Amino acid sequence: MDRPAPASVFPGQLAWENEGSSRIPFMSYTSEALHRLELERFFYRKHWCYVGLEAEIPNPGDFKLSAVGERSVILARDLEGGINVVENVCAHRGMSFCRERHGNRRDFTCPYHQWNYSLKGDLQGVPFRRGVRQEGKVNGGMPADFKLEENGLNKLKVASRGGVVFASFDADVEPLEDFLGPAVLRYFDRLFDGRALKILGYNRQRIPGNWKLMQENIKDPYHPGLLHTWFVTFGLWRADNKSELVMDAQHRHGAMISTRGQMGKADQVTSVSSFKADMKLEDPRFLDIVPEAWWGGPTAVMTTVFPSVIFQQQVNSVSTRHIQPDGHGAFDFIWTHFAFADDSEEMVQRRLRQANLFGPAGFVSADDGEVIELSQKGFEQKPFHRTLAELGGKDVGDADHMVTETLIRGMYEYWRRVMEA
Ligand code: FES
Ligand code: FE2
């Protein structure tokens, strides 16, 4: 297959090798036209996208700059305590007026011509709205029929559950609970059960790869026990861990649930080449794991909510990971590490130490950023080829083991349906 790539590829032109979703065309990662369509169909319509945690905006006037797909939005707590998400585009001449990541203010003013908005996004003031009086007559100003209430910021629909805030540009989007579905909601609620959260900090990274690869990475239980030297060597993830994979009814979201065996460090003969028998931790506190009652069994649950976010519980480290695409070949990946407000100081320190496994330079996650970059590189050089996701068969269904790519097939089954590819 060495035809030259056309300038743009549309869903109907995608060459799928077979029915189903086990052979994914490289083109689905390399076409800018497909990417634009994905933004419309997954990020801007019919889906809820993650925008942040309520704990990031605890006080009236607090705001956080966030994103839905490639559109910049502001998450703000208004003076009455309500949660709002508005698009960061001025109603006047379209300037993306907010550049601060976090802050607190009583209202928003666009610097260009100082149109002023409430924290709910309502337009409150327009300079020289009635013109200026010069030599006895009024000159200029907005037309007499201009109405403030018709010219506010674009307000998104908002849903918040367990302190996690989602937003949608689509006024007709289904309820958040239906969007997540009962199987995934169960694991969402396990982590976000209403306890107050405490923000510990952020990691930000730009990964030069298609955004879907990040979803796939957390739907891929095949790699952690092979790629991640750290996991293998220190026994945090093994292919023979007791485990389960579940999906929502549409197969777009997923959860990888695993319970660490008693074996600990892989001390027997192993053929996994990333196992390093002579490696030991200078600071053993990275593995100072303390089981918590709310785990209810599993020691790690990684939940992918399509298309925008991953919720992580890996032993005592908990975080959200926000996917913000930027073109077909890159995305920003924002990690929010948190604790629970009633944690002891000792537990907060433990969560922080274990957070060293994650983020752009994490003992484990650094590997993922790199394999995503190199996957994209492979796709770009051979756009008419396809990936093979046939571990565990070609079908899609829940599983009670880790040796399957069923969650990836599930996601592409959904992708193919929605993209009409
Ligand atoms: Fe914002 Fe003019 S563009 S006030
Ligand atoms: Fe990984």
Image (tube, grey):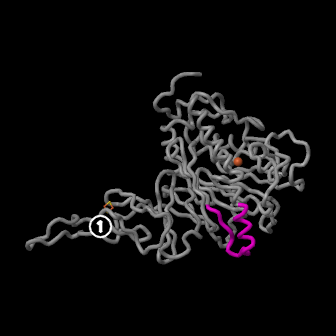
- Left or right of 119 on screen, residue 402: right
Q: Quadrant of residue 182?
A: bottom right
How busy is the neighbourhood of tag 1: few (under 14 within 10 Å), some, or many (20 plus)? few
Image-based side of 244 in relation to 18, left or right: right
Residue at image point 53% right, 50% down:
43
Q: Which residue is mark 1?
A: 147
In percent of width and height, residue 16 lies at 61, 30
| Quarter of the figure that contains the C terminus | top right
Q: Is residue 72 magenta?
A: no
**SS at circle 1:** loop
Taking the view exactly as shown, the residue that stands out farthest to the bottom is: 80
Amino acid under disc 1: Lys
Query: Residue 382's spot in the image, x, y percent?
Result: 58, 28
Q: Is residue 320 above or below residue 133?
A: above
Give the answer, above or below, for where 237 lies relative to 86.
Answer: above
Residue stretch rendered in magenta on the structure = 336-354
- The image position of residue 216, as x and y in percent, is 66, 44
